[in-house]
Each structure stands twice: as C-alpha cells, then as structure tokens.
Image: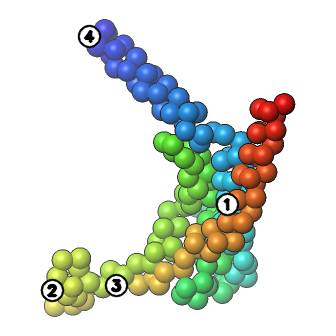
C-alpha cells in the first residue's frame, strides 16, 4: 500500500515540475510579462480605490477582528464599485497560470459586482420563482464593471513596459 501512495506523490511532483517548466518556457515568468501584469494589477487597484465615504468600525462585541462599513455612497450601476472597507481592492492578485499570467480579484463579491446578479427569474423558464403562491426574496445587483476600465487605462503602460524590457534584453543578448 505504501508503494502506491509514493507513486501518486511522485506523479504529483512530476506534474508540478512540468507545469513550472511550461511556465518557464512560455515566458509567463519573464520579467517583461511580470512587469506588465504588475502594471495591470496596480491599475485595477487604482480603479477600485475611489472612496465611498463609509466609516469602517469593528464588527461588534462577538467578533472584534472583523470590520464593517457604515454609511457611505455606493457606486451607480455601470460605474466601478466604490471603496467601502477596502477588502475588494486588497484582494487583487496576479500570478502565473499555464502559459500566461492572470490578474484576479479574490474577494467573493468581485465577480458579482463585475457581472451583476438577477435572481428574479429561473434559468430555464424565465418565469418568476414562486413558493406557495408568494414570490421568493429576489436579489438584483446591476453590473459595476471595473476590469475593462482598468485594462484600458493600463494598456499603453503595459505595452511600454514590455517594449522597454524587451529592448534591454535584446541589447544584453547582442553585447
């Protein structure tokens, strides 16, 4: 039995090694791509940094380590979300994925705010959901896209970073 588990462990480490080699060969870890991803991450955080004017207070007597926002002005539909507690902005990360790099918002509300939510209809029929003749509680959050705006703001900077680092690398290789 122990031989089987050691084989599984060895296969897992071989698979991880192949993924890392793929990232190295594809250029996902190159300084140019890292710098471009860092620039995009910075622009996403900047778009999410517009203050909403909320006051952040401790979560209450039971959990003093959590915080919640009181007051403030939420963003309008179609505008990027405004900062209330700062968790969304702090959760923006970047890292290698297969043959490239990905910038992602890890806070669970990020995708909800980006795409919006409407639970008033069922996916199949399009009719309102009913339970015992009474409509269920519905949630509608209009989309507040922020990733496309950040990409548009960062595009020229990303191209400039990749071009300058690529030129420096070419000069080092030629010398």
| Mark sitting earlier along the chain (4/2) | 4
| Mark sitting earlier along the chain (1/3) | 1
- SS under mark 3: loop
Closer to the camera in the image, 157 or 80: 157
Q: Which residue is mark 4?
A: 1
Crowd band around label 2 with a 10 angstrom C-alpha radius: few (<14), some (14–19), many (20+): few
- SS under mark 2: loop
Which numbered circle lies on residue 121?
Answer: none
Location of residue 11 in the rendering, given as x and y in whole percent from the top left corner:
37, 21
Q: Are marks 1 and 3 in contact (CB under 8 Å)?
A: no
Crowd band around label 3 with a 10 angstrom C-alpha radius: few (<14), some (14–19), many (20+): few
Q: Classify the position of the N terminus by image quarter.
A: top left
Q: Classify the position of the C terminus by image quarter.
A: top right
Residue 92 vertical placement versus 19 (above, below): below
Cα distance in 3D space between marks 3 and 2 = 15 Å
Residue at position x 57%, y 49% in the image: 101
Q: Which residue is mark 2?
A: 132
Closer to the camera in the image, 156 or 13: 156
Which residue is the extreme one toward the front? 174
Crowd band around label 4 with a 10 angstrom C-alpha radius: few (<14), some (14–19), many (20+): few
Cα distance in 3D space between marks 4 and 2 = 55 Å
Closer to the camera in the image, 155 or 175: 175
Which numbered circle lies on residue 40?
Answer: 1
Which numbered circle lies on residue 138?
Answer: 3
Q: Are marks 2 and 1 in contact (CB under 8 Å)?
A: no
The quarter of the picture where residue 77 lies is bottom right
- Relative placement, left or right, of 87 versus 53 is left
Cα distance in 3D space between marks 1 and 4 = 48 Å
Is residue 85 visible in the rendered structure shown here?
A: no
Q: Are marks 3 and 4 in contact (CB under 8 Å)?
A: no
Query: Nearer the observer, disc 2 or disc 1?
Result: 1
């Amino acid at each position: 039995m122990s031989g089987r588990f050691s084989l599984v462990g060895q296969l897992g480490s071989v698979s991880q090694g192949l993924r890392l080699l793929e990232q190295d060969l594809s250029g996902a870890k190159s300084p140019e791509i890292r710098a471009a991803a860092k620039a995009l991450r910075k622009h996403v955080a900047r778009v999410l940094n517009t203050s909403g004017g909320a006051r952040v207070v401790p979560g209450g007597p039971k959990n003093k380590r959590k915080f919640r926002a009181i007051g403030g002005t939420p963003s309008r539909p179609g505008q990027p979300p405004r900062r209330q507690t700062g968790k969304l902005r702090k959760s923006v990360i970047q890292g290698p994925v297969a043959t490239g790099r990905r910038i992602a918002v890890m806070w669970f509300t990020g995708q909800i705010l980006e795409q919006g939510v409407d639970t008033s209809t069922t996916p199949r029929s399009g009719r309102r959901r009913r339970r015992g003749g009474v409509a269920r509680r519905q949630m509608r959050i209009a989309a507040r896209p922020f990733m496309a705006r950040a990409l548009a703001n960062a595009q020229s900077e990303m191209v400039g970073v990749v071009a300058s680092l690529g030129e420096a690398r070419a000069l080092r290789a030629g010398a």
